[in-house]
Image (spheres, grey):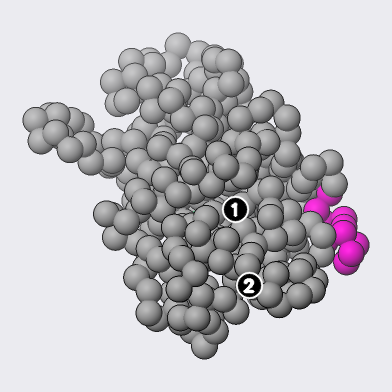
Amino acid sequence: MTNQTLLEVKGLKKHFNLGKKQNLKAVDGISFEIYRGETFGIVGESGCGKSTAGRTIIGLYDATEGDVVFDGKNVHEMNERERFDFHKQMQMIFQDPYASLNPRSTVSEIISEPMEVHGMYKNKRERLERVYQLLEDVGLNRDHANRYPHEFSGGQRQRIGIARALALNPEFIIADEPISALDVSVQAQVVNLLKQLQREKGLTYLFIAHDLSMVKQISDRIAVMYLGHIVELTDSKMLYNNPLHPYTQALLSAIPIPDPDVEDKRERIILKGELPSPINPPSGCVFRTRCAHAMDACASVKPEWQEIEPNHFVACHLYNKKVTGDHDFSQVAASK
Ligand SMILES: Nc1ncnc2c1ncn2[C@@H]1O[C@H](COP(=O)(O)OP(=O)(O)OP(=O)(O)O)[C@@H](O)[C@H]1O
């Protein structure tokens, strides 16, 4: 990982207009930078806006507000030509390897399609050689080229999806829950493959997941997302050793620990109620309706984004002395 910014997301919002004056705030003002060569994780429960964030960053959705700057260029201000070139540099891997591969195309056709669209390798033979190379890069082999997606296991299908994403030699890959649909035994293999490809090709990843345990293994830094907002951001070690936001603490407490003695004694933080609707999110702090520490200020004032320790940011009134006054912090520490 370097300290060179490759992607900058600034105040990004994506609202869906549902008609009848209803506006669904899927992503509601997120900001972060991703450094060249790093894996940046976004975690949060289903419906918090992770996929929408990824799709808006890559330009599949127009942003409602805010900027996405990739390698110095604003993605949402690119003309057609620039956007075409940009797609060579940024690719996406999807959650469901069953749905994202055309069942009627051979593996070779699936992987070579982006190369054809972008006019890479005019000659079919060269393109096929590249397909063989990509298959080897992802742990498959050239004999697989003429087969169809249904002939493969889930893990192998995800490898085909990865080979397709690599076809244009991108610098940046958004992996949207790439292992959630796979058996647990296969998940680690795919994560290891992604790590290996990152080392070999100098890739930068945005890794989206709801499972904190897997994100920890692959990410350098992690942003925790809740109801369209980022509530905490730091490096993955710090997030696990010193989670500050009550939501992060709850997510961490839900990760099963393999040792039954530790697991039995451990206190689970159960979140109150359901995830509120992003159509009408709570005022002030979006997490307040499920937070055990909610104070009066949480209902009226949006928490500031603060750096509590070097490179550890949180948006929570508990860490703002102006708001908390003499609030008892011992409860928060005990719940970690
Ligand atoms: N095209 C769309 N039109 C309207 N609402 C949408 C659209 N896409 C997503 N949403 C809504 O936006 C919110 C965020 O969805 P999103 O899929 O980004 O969340 P997520 O955190 O990725 O969840 P999951 O892990 O289940 O995919 C949800 O309330 C969802 O219903």
Residue 117 falls left or right of residue 267 = right
Say which amino acid is labelled 2. Answer: Leu
Q: Earlier in the sequence, mark 2 or mark 1?
A: 2
Q: Amino acid at mark 1?
A: Ile
Residue plotted at (77% across, 46% down): 70
Is residue 78 part of the magenta span, yes or no?
yes
What is the magenta segment's predominant secondary structure? helix
Whole-percent x and y of residue 157?
43, 69
Q: Nearer the viewer, residue 95 or 319?
A: 95
Name the residue located 60 percent from the left edge and 79 percent from the top edge.
109
Q: Is residue 87 left or right of residue 315?
A: right
**Relative to 9, does residue 185 appear above or below in the rendering?**
below
Q: Is residue 126 above or below residue 52?
A: below
What residue does disc 2 label? 128
In the drawing, does residue 138 fall left or right of residue 188?
right
Q: Secondary structure at mark 1?
A: strand
Q: Position of residue 137 (x, y in %)?
A: 52, 55
Mark 2, other Cα within 10 Å: few <14 / some 14–19 / many ≥20? some
Whether residue 311 appears in this view of the structure is yes
